[in-house]
Image (cartoon, rainbow, N blue to C red):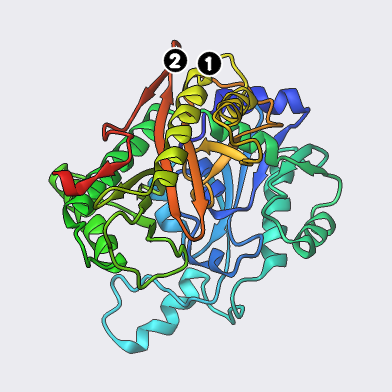
Amino acid sequence: MADIDRRRAGLLMREAGLDGLVLFQPEAFHYAVGAPSGVATMWGRAGAAIALVPEDEDRPVAAVVSDHAAGGIRRANPEAELLTHRIWIDMLDVTGVKHAAGIDEAYRRSGNAGPRPETFNRSEAFSRLYDLLNARGMTGARLGADLEFMPAADFADLQAAVPGVTWVDGSQVLRRTRAVKTPAEIERLIRAGRAAEAGLVAMAGAIEPGASLAALSLAWKTGAQAYAAQNGFSLSGHWDYISVGPDLADMAARVTSGALIKADVGTLVGGYSSDGARTFTHGRPSDLALDIFMALEEAFLAGLGALKPGNLFRDVHAAAMAAMQKAGFQEYARGHFGHSVGGSVGIEEWPFFSASNEEEILPGMVVALEAPFYGQGLGALMIEDMFVVTQHGAECVNTLPRGLIDLSQR
């Protein structure tokens, strides 16, 4: 099932004067079609998989896909109209063939005979897109493409291969559509957040003098995977940025008394990534670390106070910055205090809690609010939680205490 909210997408397309979105980025394709785009997208070029999302939500999504991926996509979304192009992988249905002599005839019957491209034929894929648009009467349409993804050379070839279409950048429409999550997306993110937090609990249990950064990372990963298994779901990925001690780049660091241990971590469920962070020590940290962390706590709470529907993303940034400055950190200049989370490329997803972001905070958004400080020679300090925005406020996904936790006191 596709995650895209067709009603919201249609509304945003009408506001932008678009007749449809044509999506080339693999993650955007999956979002719109509800199935992986296939191996041909590994080359990072436009055309291997293309999704057409009409402005009219009553018209089904259509796609141009590789012949290798088509079967899986049809099973995942039987309603989607598919046209195919050939890729380098030679694959044949040999059901009923008993002897090697019958293979050539099977190729001929399938229409699958003939040479294949080195990877995939971009011109053929764009030609199939033109056929699709022509069949739908959209060859003179105004269409938005996800140009934030598309290489410039591919866009030039697209314009030549699909004449008559007015191509514009549809990236913002796609980003704004994705910013408000469906219940299924929210459930994936909550599961991912809770698995990551279970990993932090396991990691905390492994923190002791002499413990290596690598051992802490393994403990976190093992704890997150165990939580997922115990709760009947699987992780599609995981990541961690853990630092130990005053040298932020020392990947061979070991825990010493009072050293800062920052863990910024996330797991993925169905391609949707959580994001959260805590800071630990084993022994009393320095007075400087305590002073900075106290200011970060105030900034986090100030930002959280502004995290409510109807406010703007910039309001959260302004509140957090004002708190840092009030605490005496006049030169602290954080570019953003968090972001949306989801299933697009990377961990951090637009919109950001930045000074210039005038996007409105809306119910259904899932965001990560963060207050970090990185000090080479001191270490890293960070608080980060995920929140689901509701009609009345923001519900926190996380349950661990936000304080600077001294594990020597356990």
Proximity of marks 1 and 2: CB atoms separated by less than 8 Å: yes
**For residue 57, side relative to residue 367 (left or right):** right
Residue density around tag 2, few if under 14, some if 14–19, many if 20 or more, within 10 Å = some
**For residue 229, side relative to residue 155 (left or right):** left
Check the image and report above or below for 310 versus 236.
Answer: above
Check the image and report above or below for 130 versus 54.
Answer: below
- Please identify the residue farthest to the front as the structure is shown: 287
Seen at 23% across and 53% down, the residue is 203
- Please identify the residue farthest to the bottom as the structure is shown: 101
Residue type at the position of mark 1: Pro
Residue 225 location in percent, x, y?
A: 22, 54
Residue 378 location in percent, x, y?
A: 45, 56
In the rendered structure, which disc, 1 or 2, sits on the residue that comes first in sequence? Answer: 1
Residue 1 visible to the viewer: no
Residue 157 location in percent, x, y?
A: 80, 62
Seen at 26% across and 58% down, the residue is 257
Question: What is the secondary structure assignment of the residue under circle 1?
Answer: loop
Quarter of the image where one finds residue 217 = bottom left
Find disc 2 in the rendering and name its residue: 393
Question: What is the secondary structure assignment of the residue under circle 2?
Answer: loop
Residue type at the position of mark 2: Gly
Quarter of the image where one finds residue 183 = top left
Seen at 59% across and 36% down, the residue is 329
Residue 103 location in percent, x, y?
A: 39, 82
Find disc 1 in the rendering and name its residue: 309
Q: What is the spatial separation of the Cα atoms under label 1 and label 2, in whole angstroms?
A: 6 Å
